[in-house]
Image (tube, rainbow, N blue to C red):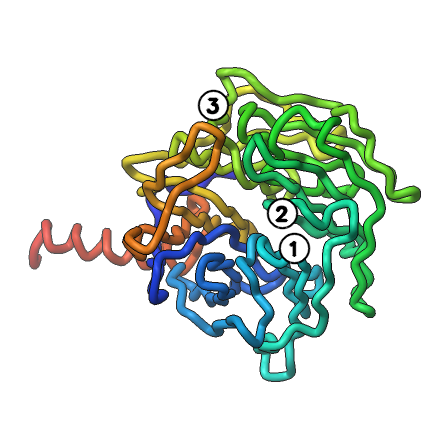
Amino acid sequence: MSYEPRPIDCIQNNSWAYSLINSVAFHPSEDLFCAAFSSVNQLINFKVDKFGQARVTQVIKHPDALLHAPQHVVFSPDGKKIIVINWSSTTFTIYQRGEDELYASLPIACIPFPAPLAALKPHGMDISPSGKFLTVAFGWINTHQKAIGLFSFDDEGPEIRLLDWIPDESLPGVPKGIAFSPDETCLLVTYSDLNCICIYDFDRQTGRINPVPTQTFEGEATRLARPEDIKVSRDGNSITVSNSEADYVTSYSFDCTNNRITEKRPTQALENPDAHMRFPHGIAYSPNGALLVVSQFGPLPVTSNGDIVFGRQTPRRQAKINIYRQQHSHPALKSSHWRRSWSSLMRLIGPR
């Protein structure tokens, strides 16, 4: 699966101040995605039309929403709930969709992190295809405590319960992005300070994670450069990673039967100047895989311990969201391109 090198739409941050856009997530069956604007405590839903252009459909914001630096957002597999992890309050907040197709501005649940993880800062999150499990990468900087957590998710409750976690001392570096394998037997984790991806087995029956990776994917050929988010494609045959240090997004072949990354070199890299990226962070596939959405922070400096620097003077429009289209995937866009090409040809030929 490959995407055209240039974005077909760019959404600029129109909030009152600069905001990190830490994550993006697509609805499982609609061309609707949610973005977490962390610094201004907002979730913004965007609808993408048939030409790949996005428009705002809803803004969910603090204080009613109990958002405290929302870090990562996912949709439940049926699309009826949005689940968020909050950086500052270290909580999960859950929002229910109503009959008007909008999500309630008040969360139906606000669940604190369990005691072993209460002091940790969350980064990446994913929900399993069945909706029975959540996983969170607790990673920030190399001087702060970190962990990987696996949770059960009861949609009816809603209830989130800790099943198992890998503690700081058992992790090789700072975990940032995390994703379930399609068969829900593995976790794929990016380590930003080590430029690698580790794959961990877990047992669905016991809820236990094997702390020893089954694969460590690393090396110069991978082109991993401070990897952040990671997503498995809708067909399960590839993975995509945002590389904030190098300003590009890379994709790799993935064997979803054996849960292994099969080739060292990327199958594609969305990179500048065509990609118009600065500090890519959150990534999401549309339901049919035809679109790839990437959030970006802009040209923020990074300290020696891996922290990022921004403030009141940071231009608000540095934060953006780019939308990329799968190559030769969209009939409406292909037909409009054909019409433009035909019109250009006729102008060159002239009247006959």
Give x and y (percent) for residue 42.
49, 66
Q: CA distance from mark 1 to mark 3?
A: 33 Å
Say above or below: 233 vs 73. above
Give x and y (percent) for residue 41.
49, 64
Picture residue at 73% right of the left edge, 59% below the top:
112
Determine crowd level at label 2: few under 14, some 14-19, many 20+ residues with C-alpha closer than 10 A. many
Give x and y (percent) for residue 283.
51, 47
Q: Nearer the viewer, residue 120 or 334?
A: 120
Specify the amino acid type for callout 3.
Answer: Arg
Q: Which residue in the protein does label 3 denote?
A: 223
Q: SS for tag 2?
A: loop
Numbered tag placed on residue 90 in the rendering: 1
Q: Is residue 255 left or right of residue 326?
A: right
Q: Residue furthest right?
A: 206
Say above or below: 106 vs 70. below
Tell us which disc is closer to us: 2 or 1.
Answer: 1
Q: CA distance from mark 2 to mark 1?
A: 7 Å
Q: Nearer the viewer, residue 102 or 111?
A: 111
Q: Residue furthest top?
A: 220
Q: Earlier in the sequence, mark 2 or mark 3?
A: 2
Q: CA distance from mark 2 to mark 3?
A: 25 Å
Q: Which residue in the protein does label 2 denote?
A: 122
Give x and y (percent) for residue 243.
46, 34
Q: Earlier in the sequence, mark 1 or mark 3?
A: 1
Q: Nearer the viewer, residue 180 or 245?
A: 245
Could you tell me if the residues under marks 2 and 1 are in contact, i.e. CB atoms within 8 Å?
yes
Picture residue at 67% right of the left edge, 35% below the top:
188
Specify the amino acid type for callout 1.
Answer: Thr
Specify the amino acid type for callout 2.
Answer: Pro
